[in-house]
Amino acid sequence: MLPFLKKYKFFLLTMFVFSVVFLTISYQLLQPKKMLPIMNPADVNPELVDTTVQHISKYHTISDFSFTNQNGKIITQKDYEGKIYVADFFFTTCQSICPIMTKNMVDVQKAIRNNPKVMLLSHSVLPDQDSVPVLKKYALEKGVIDAKWNLVTGDKKAIYWIARKSYLAVKTASATEMYDMVHTENFILVDTKKRIRGFYDGTKIQDVKRLIEDIDFLSKEE
């Protein structure tokens, strides 16, 4: 047996290496390719989607907007053109979920700081209270990087409308509730074509880690 092994050791070694390479490539090819869904209202749990848009099954995108950021600058869709971004809704005096969400969004900011493709957008749901100076003070306290993260205030109806109709961030049970308080833990991932690619619980570390991973994946995909 030993002479046989010596005689054919090069052949056997070659076959072994070939087998390892073949099995590795086969395993990688058989692994399901990661994909992020393109989310339309009809794809989302109806318990979380405004009743007036639940029927929309394709071509849903974030509507145009115009708000004012922490520096008094008007922020529109143009500022996010060609960008991947994460949107959420908060108010500066919130003592329940908002502090946790803001802390976790700061972690997202750290992760995307050197990625020119990605930005953040936080909408105040108490815009009358959260004036530009209030947002600026909050931004400084939390370490917001102006070039990466806009905290915006503006017309309350416009903010509540976009939260419910565009970002699908919170359900409205009836027309009378359209402008009732928006209070949601959702972080919404939006791609360069203004399409929603994922929802994440901004109060949960595991969801935030998943969001960061999905941002990285989307950055490479786009």
Image: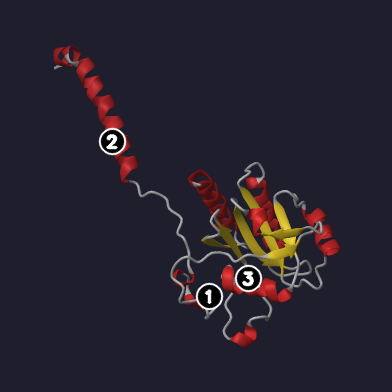
Find residue 178 and report its horizontal and vertical position in percent: 63, 81
**Cα–Cα span, label 3 and label 2:** 50 Å
Mark 1 belongs to which amino acid? Val
**178 lies left or right of 11:** right
Give, as a three-letter code, the residue at label 3.
Answer: Ile
Q: Secondary structure at mark 3?
A: helix
**Residue 46 seen in this snapshot:** yes
Residue 51 point in image, percent of width and height:
52, 81
Q: State whether residue 150 is above or below residue 153.
A: above
**Mark 3 or mark 2, which is nearer to you?**
3
**As drawn, is 192 to the left or to the right of 181?**
left
Residue 119 relative to residue 216: left or right: right
When the figure is inspected, residue 144 is found, relative to residue 161, above or below; the finding is: above
Distance Cα–Cα, label 2 vs label 1: 45 Å
Residue underneath mark 1: 49
Check disc 1 and report its element: helix, strand or loop.
loop
Number of numbered labels in the structure image: 3
Residue position marked by numbered label 2 in the rendering: 23
- Mark 2 Cα-neighbour bin, 10 Å: few <14, some 14–19, many ≥20: few
Q: Nearer the viewer, residue 122 or 29?
A: 122
Dot 2 or dot 1: first in sequence order is 2
Compare marks 3 and 2 and give the one earlier in the sequence. Answer: 2
- Tell me: 93 left or right of 11: right
Q: Nearer the viewer, residue 61 or 135?
A: 61
